[in-house]
Image (cartoon, rainbow, N blue to C red):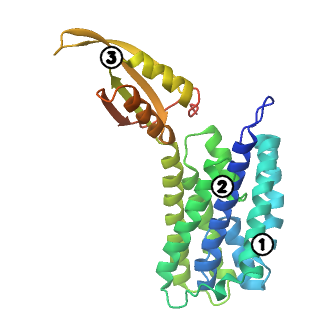
Amino acid sequence: MIKINTGKINYKKVFFQYFVIVLGLFAYTFGWCVFLIPKHIVGGGVAGVASIIYLALGVPIGVSNFLINSVLVVIGLRMLGLKFGLNTLFGIIVASFAFIFWQQIVHIQNYVDVSNLESFMCAILGAGIAGVGIGTTFNNGGNSGGTDIIALIVNKYHDISPGMVILYIDIFIVASSFIFVPGAKIDNIVYGYIVMIVFAYVLDLTIEGYKQAYQIMVFSSKNKEIADAIGSRVKRGVTLLNGYGWYSKKEQQVLVVIARKQDKVEIMKIIKEIDSNSFISIAKTQGVFGKNFDTIKS
């Protein structure tokens, strides 16, 4: 979730986070409205249930999405607290409005014609765009409600990826579309499962890509200056280890810093500014747990 301290609030940062959440949700609903629904392909989640209702009864997806999620948000309030409920309510409202915006206001299907595309291609494109959208939303503390609520509850207490949780829950939803969607064929069910798999994969890829951390080791005679600059400009902790250069036969300090992907460029810039001749080793980490990173879960 978006963490807002009780002290000084960085309004620009908060505004930017919510702005990115809105963009992510609009991308998510765009994938559904343009590529999946016109081909009668039903994915998982509350959006999948709302799609079934829309294809069977004609009720706008945005309306069904809002009503179903309004019930599920109560679960989030009880399990994850008030802040989660408020952020989820924001996501539900935005996602529901985005569905209505694409379908009932813009009539996006009249501008983006996918009738000439194969259903398989539409399933890949729709799921990929939706996965990136939701992944971006997750990374900035938001969500679209629905099975995302369940996924985040499980992920909060156990190291199980949100994509896999959503995948298992959604199997039943996609299968049920064969019964309730008029004219549904086995092909539609197969494409629905393709959507689930691609969506889960892209979602995890987007989240893990955002969380990617690096271990940077710097061998330089100016490590103290580099450490001070990293601490003041990037706000990352730095460790200096005592080492001994076997080739030079001299003692020297080795700077070690664990940094997020988005911090790596700035750190490299600092190192180049202070000592362009330094020796640097960069390695991707499998996982980083502790202050300012992930927490260990049972």
Residue 20 got which mark?
2
Where residue 85 appears, x then y in whole percent?
80, 48
How many residues crowd mark 2 within 10 Å: few (<14), some (14–19), many (20+)?
Answer: some
Which dot, 1 or 3, sits closer to the camera? 3
In three-dimensional space, the C-alpha distance between marks 2 and 3, rounded to whole angstroms, equals 41 Å
**Considering depth in this image, is 9 or 198 the residue closer to the camera?**
9
Among the two numbered marks 2 and 1 on one chain, the one whose residue lies closer to the N terminus:
2
Q: Residue at x 54, y 57 (%)?
A: 203
Does residue 32 appear in the picture of this structure? yes
Q: Residue beneath label 1, please?
A: 62
Q: Amino acid at mark 3?
A: Ser
Where is residue 235? Give x, y as percent.
56, 28
Under mark 2, the amino acid is Val
Among the 4 quarters of the image, the one containing residue 113: bottom right
In the image, is 101 to the left or to the right of 36?
A: right
User: For numbered disc 2, what is the local secondary structure?
Assistant: helix
